Image (cartoon, rainbow, N blue to C red):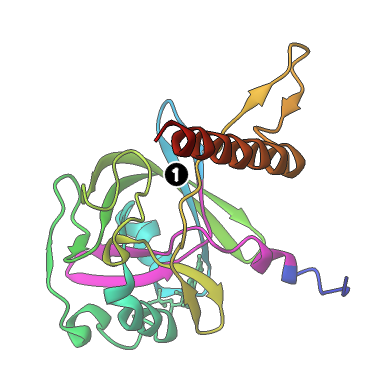
Amino acid sequence: MRPLEPTDALRLLNGGPVVLLTSRFRNETNVMPAIWTVPLSRRPPFIGVAVNQARHTHDMVRFAEEFALNFPGRELLNHTHYFGMVSGANVGKLELAKLPTFNASKISAPLIENCLAYVECSLEDALRVGDHTLFVGRILVVQAEPEGFDGTWLIADPEYRPLHYLGIDRYAVLGDRLTAELRTTEEGAIELAESPEERERREEEEAKETERRRREGEDGR
Ligand SMILES: Cc1cc2nc3c(=O)[nH]c(=O)nc-3n(C[C@H](O)[C@H](O)[C@H](O)COP(=O)(O)O)c2cc1C
């Protein structure tokens, strides 16, 4: 094990899908990628996103009191990174990127076309935490592409996998979907479905059985 800096712990937690946080205040729109997001409450449904106080988005959300989360796939990889490298304080990122947008249903922030899912939020609370503000969003509307999400991310089709951010300029998409299979003993302890030894023994028995059947078949002819 190699000792690291405290801030490396932040990156160890990276891996949740990247969202493109869109906002509108008066006539101005903005977008920034965010990964410091957190589910906060089921009833009522609240989601949190930590935005650095220096971001242009920070003031946009504070004043507009609403924001949207757009979930990009690999098709929007370069746009996502670009939106994280320049500030809307200096340029109109959405206009420059020429990405088509459409109207959200409950809020005025634009939604970016060709994303895999969208969440519209009104601002419920804003908590200062160090150099970030945790914006607590009340979830108003959620929509997702059925090819990508059916209650969980499907990740079957590479084009419909959400984008994950590792740090620097590195991104990833999820590979294999694994389904956990739990068996417990009567006392409630976890029991592995089959140990490697058990599997080996079973395969040996099966091979012997196949051989026996083959011989019997030969004799009967
Ligand atoms: C993939 C990615 C994820 C990011 N996540 C966050 C985040 O969660 N919170 C944050 O404050 N900044 C985050 N950033 C940095 C902002 O997106 C970046 O500073 C952006 O240029 C801010 O734009 P703005 O000034 O127009 O709001 C992230 C950057 C990248 C590339």
Relative image position of residue 203 (x, y in whole percent):
63, 42
Q: In this view, does 46 lie to the left or right of 147?
A: right
Q: What residue type is labelled 1?
A: Ile
Q: Mark 1, residues whose alpha carbon is within 10 Å: few (<14), some, or many (≥20)?
A: many
Q: In this view, does 119 lie to the left or right of 2?
A: left
> Residue lying furthest top in this view?
186
Q: Which of 73 and 175 is in front in this view?
A: 175
| Identity of the residue drawn at 64% across and 24% down | 183
Q: Where is residue 89 in the image (x, y as percent from the top left)?
A: 36, 82
Task: Quadrant for the C terminus, please.
Answer: top left
Q: Does the magenta stretch include residue 12?
A: yes
Q: Residue at x 20, y 61 (%)?
A: 111
Is 17 one of the magenta-colored residues? yes
Quarter of the figure with residue 220: top left
Residue at 67% x, 35% y is 194
Read off the residue under disc 1. 47
Q: Where is residue 102 in the image (x, y as percent from the top left)?
A: 11, 62
Where the N terminus falls, by quadrant? bottom right
Q: Relative to 115, does residue 65 appear above or below in the rendering?
A: above
Q: Is mark 1 on a helix, strand or loop?
A: strand
Query: Which residue is more in the foreground, 187 or 14?
Result: 187
Residues shaded magenta: 9-38
Which quadrant of the structure image shows residue 29? bottom left
Q: How many numbered marks are there? A: 1
Identify which residue, 206 or 121, lies in the foreground: 206
> Is 28 placed above or below 110 here?
below
Q: Residue shown at 46%/51% (left/top)? A: 177
Find residue 100 and report its image quarter.
bottom left
The answer to whether the beta carbon of the residue marked 1 is less than 8 Å from any atom of ligand 1 is no
Residue 11 in percent (x, y) is at 65, 68
Look at the picture and state if 183 lies above or below 166.
above
